[in-house]
Image: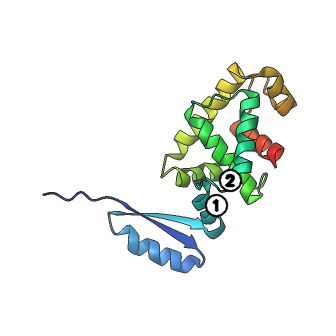
Amino acid sequence: MERTKEKIKVIIINRNIRLVIEHLNILKKKEHIKVINVRKHHYEIVKNLNNEHFQENLRSRIIHILGVIGMPKDRLGYQYIVSAIFYLNKTGKTRHLKVENIYEELSLIYDGINVHSIEKSIRKVIESTFNHGHKDELSKVFRSSISLETGTVSNKKFIYTLAEKIS
């Protein structure tokens, strides 16, 4: 009987950078361990994002506004956008985080999905929303931010604008 090696996910909450580096060096030598290093307040938020009862009001407001602008719920990027806006509102950092950091946090939430896949899924659902969504509502929300060349907004502008609108 063969035993398959499953990767064990280890989350290190960053308090003392020297200790974290020591732990990383020890743990990286073992093949069956996947090390994830996060800041303490980010860990608490990520841990609570999947809790059904945690901040249900905020989640329902996010879902409502996405419905108003006509975002298709059946696309993969939809849930990533809901989680990104939720995350920004919970951290209170609606303008201070780089969008790449949000993709990294989403990668943690969704069990290591590739950051580029998350970015691409978000981009595709935003493009779909601007092509097939409610044009009047989109122009009200995004006003002059809509690019004349592409007819849409960047992922960052989309996420941050909605996060600010909901907060």
Left or right relative to 136: residue 87? left
Separation of marks 1 and 2 at Cα, in angstroms: 7 Å
Labels 1 & 2 near each other (Cβ < 8 A): yes
Residue 144 in sight here: no
Query: Where, quadrant-wise, is the N terminus in this rendering?
Result: bottom left
Q: Position of residue 149 (x, y in %)?
A: 75, 22
Residue at x 60%, y 58% (from the top left corner) = 46
Q: Is residue 142 above or below residue 98?
A: above
Q: Position of residue 88 (x, y in %)?
A: 72, 52
Tag 1: amino acid: Ile
Q: Position of residue 62 (x, y in %)?
A: 73, 42
For marks 1 and 2, the one nearer the N-term is: 1
Residue furthest left in the image: 1
Q: Nearer the viewer, residue 69 or 24?
A: 69
Number of numbered labels in the structure image? 2
Quarter of the figure with residue 138: top right
Tag 2: amino acid: Tyr
Which class describes the residues within 10 Å of circle 2: few (<14), some (14-19), or many (20+)?
many
Residue at x 74%, y 49% (from the top left corner) = 58
Which class describes the residues within 10 Å of circle 1: few (<14), some (14-19), or many (20+)?
some
Residue at x 63%, y 28% (from the top left corner) = 72
From the image, tell me which residue sits under label 2.
87
Left or right relative to 166: residue 29? left
SS of the residue under disc 2: helix
SS of the residue under disc 1: helix
From the image, tell me which residue sits under label 1.
45
